[in-house]
Amino acid sequence: MAFLSARVGRIIPSASSVATQRARELAAAGRDVLSLSQGEPDFATPDHVIEAAYRAMRDGQTRYTTIDGVPGLKAAVVEKFRRENRLSFKPENISVGAGGKQVLFNAVMATVDPGDEAVIPAPFWLAYRDMVQFAEGTPVYVQTRPENGFKITPAELEAALTPRTKWLLLNSPGNPAGGTYSAAELAALAAVLERHPQVWVLSDDIYEHVIFDGRQFATLLNVAPQFAERSLIVNGVSKSFAMTGWRFGFGAGPAALIRAMAKIQIQATANPSSVSQAAATAALTGTQDFVPQRRDEFQRRRDAIVPKLNAIAGLSCAKPEGAFYVYVSCAGWIGRRTPAGATLGSDADVAMYLLEDAGVATVHGAAYGTSPYLRLSIASSMEHLDEACRRIATAGERLA
Ligand code: PLP
């Protein structure tokens, strides 16, 4: 449609939303669909957070607030970074938005000009690509390898950097493949970046608390504090506190960048919901006891599902180190024929076959830049996951 901007044309609808939408349609038509496509915890928002939101509404916290966060909330975010990450920030270094997504969006819009490059290790959360393209920047994908835990190596990083590189986008633990950088791995990347002072690092730490096998979470500034002047950390409450719908996230970076991000936000949404800010303050300052319990539950599910998937001929996956997805290679199914006579030519075909034939919704790897894979979310009950594995195995047996 000629009326629409070229900008909107550059945005490809999120494949995970397309899959979720199709799964909903089938479910609405009466089909029994198991959805493993969602990127949100299946747990409830903690009670004390809901209580805090209710109290805030009763107390009249229902008005506009300062654009990027009320002072009490910024103080809670500063304290979170001190307590959990051993990082020292001031309130002027903190940005608060409607989800980690808005904080990322603000950062990209405030910094990327046409032709600027952002290095994005693949597989990646697809919003990175779209945001960079939205800003008329150029995403530079680096294919990571399963044998490296889907993490970019220093040599791969070095090869991707150019004088136009503005950002390296690091997401650890990572969506969709769960790659989680150790402090040593981050230090090795920092050593490369030292030689390229034009490059900033965006650390998307949103899955910080979903980290397995006793690994210690590390972010770049822990090992390379000298990057404080060219780094932005993005985090939030969606994944750790099961608060996806509240739309609340935060960032920490140099004050000049934070101010520029607020300029973008003021014309987009202005402040994030006052009620969500009260809820997030309660989440960040209240008990955190449930956080390791939920992490352990995700690990239990991961440990149960990975062997089952590996037992299915043609599929294989490694144990993710963090986040709540399993990234499964379906290379062994490509070229096979379905009972209806169609040939599975790509991971998108495999995902559609599983949805239509087995009633299991997954997201195909091409949506994350690495094929042929499927992303399965383990943010689902164990019974649900067991049944999904059974159905996938049967679908595999039906292939010629
Ligand atoms: N970063 C990654 C890697 C994600 O997977 C998501 C959500 O799926 C987000 C950021 C944004 O989370 P939210 O906007 O809900 O805080």
Image (spheres, rainbow, N blue to C red):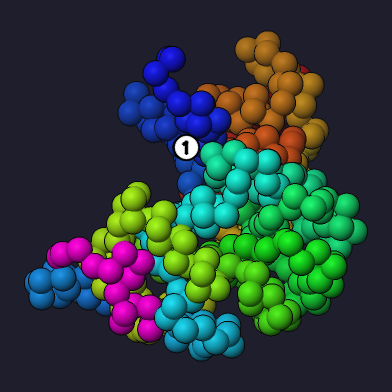
Instruction: Specify start and end residues of the magenta stretch as a single range.
Output: 62-77
Image side of residue 50 versus residue 90, left or right: left
* Spot occupied by residue 294 in the image (x, y as percentages of width and height): 48, 70
Q: Residue at horizontal 51%, vertical 83%?
A: 89
Residue named by callout 1: 17
Q: In the rendered image of this protein, does residue 206 appear above or below residue 90?
A: above
Question: For residue 332, what is the image quadrant?
Answer: top right
Q: Nearer the viewer, residue 217 or 289?
A: 217
Q: Secondary structure at mark 1?
A: helix
* Above or below, 26 relative to 71: above
At 28% from the left and 69% from the top, the residue drawn is 66
Instruction: Please state, as top left, top right, bottom left or bottom right, where the N terminus lies in the image.
Output: top left
Q: Residue 104: in sight, yes or no? A: no
* Rendering quarter of residue 374: top right
Identify the image quadrant of residue 173.
bottom right
Give the x, y percent position of residue 210. Answer: 57, 68
Q: Identify the residue shown where x is 69% and y is 50%.
A: 118
Res. 198 in view: yes
Q: In the visual, does 23 lie left or right of 112?
A: left
Check disc 1 and give the amino acid type: Ser
Quarter that holds the C terminus:
top right
Q: Nearer the viewer, residue 70 or 25?
A: 70
Point out residue 382 in the picture as x, y percentages from the top left corner.
Answer: 51, 56
Q: Is residue 90 above or below residue 291?
A: below
**Position of residue 193 in the picture relative to residue 366 (left or right):** right
